[in-house]
Image (cartoon, rainbow, N blue to C red):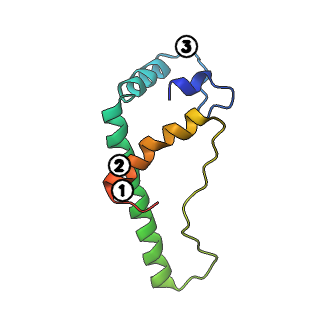
């Protein structure tokens, strides 16, 4: 996330305000910018997304609501080869978690 702050098309942009709470938040964010914390947090996000999907499936079954429900995943676009190469980390976590992609 730190490297995004300098990118032209950054998916994360933070405007420095000088506020102590912002600096504390940034320090916490930095503590989570390690490979091991990335893997833990990515796995948590995967579990949350699977739980969300299962709840929606249950809601559809219980209520009979009908809509264009598509479960085809997401599309990711990369501007550079380095960004594409970086996606390998995400794929590794998905494989380790047994999540189809």
* Residue for badge 3: 18
Taking the image as shown, residue 55 lies to the left or right of residue 2, namely: left
Residue at (63%, 25%) from the top-left corner?
7
Residue at (43%, 49%) from the top-left corner?
91
Give neighbour class at mark 1: few <14, some 14-19, many 20+ (Cα, 10 Å).
some
Q: Please report contact status of discs 1 and 2: CB closer than 8 Å, yes or no.
A: yes
- Can you give x and y, in whole percent of width and height, for residue 30 in the image? 41, 23
Taking the image as shown, residue 53 lies to the left or right of residue 34, namely: right
Quarter-wise, where is residue 78 in the image? Answer: top right
Q: What element carries label 1?
A: helix
Q: Which is nearer the N-term, disc 2 or disc 3?
A: 3
Residue at (39%, 63%) from the top-left corner?
51
- Can you give x and y, in whole percent of width and height, for residue 2 in the image? 50, 24
Taking the image as shown, residue 56 lies to the left or right of residue 81, namely: left
Residue placed most toward the observer, 34 or 69 = 34
* Residue for badge 1: 47
Residue at (42%, 27%) from the top-left corner?
29
* Residue for badge 2: 43
Give neighbour class at mark 2: few <14, some 14-19, many 20+ (Cα, 10 Å).
some
Please name which of the two marks, 2 or 3, marks the residue nearer to the observer: 2
Please name which of the two marks, 1 or 3, marks the residue nearer to the observer: 1
The answer for how far apart the CA atoms under marks 1 and 2 are is 6 Å
- Can you give x and y, in whole percent of width and height, for residue 67 in the image? 63, 78
Q: Which is nearer the N-term, disc 1 or disc 3?
A: 3
Residue placed most toward the observer, 21 or 48 = 48
Q: In this view, does 42 lie above or below 3?
A: below
Q: What element carries label 2?
A: helix
């Amino acid at each position: 996330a730190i490297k995004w702050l300098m990118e032209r098309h950054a998916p994360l942009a933070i405007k420095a305000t000088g506020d102590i709470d912002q600096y504390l938040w940034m320090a916490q964010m930095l503590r989570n910018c390690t490979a091991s914390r990335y893997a833990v947090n990515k796995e948590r996000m995967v579990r949350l997304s699977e739980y969300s999907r299962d709840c929606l499936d249950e809601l559809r079954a219980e209520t009979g609501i009908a809509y264009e429900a598509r479960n085809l995943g997401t599309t990711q676009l990369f501007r550079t080869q380095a960004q594409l190469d970086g996606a390998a980390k995400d794929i590794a976590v998905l494989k380790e978690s047994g999540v189809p992609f």
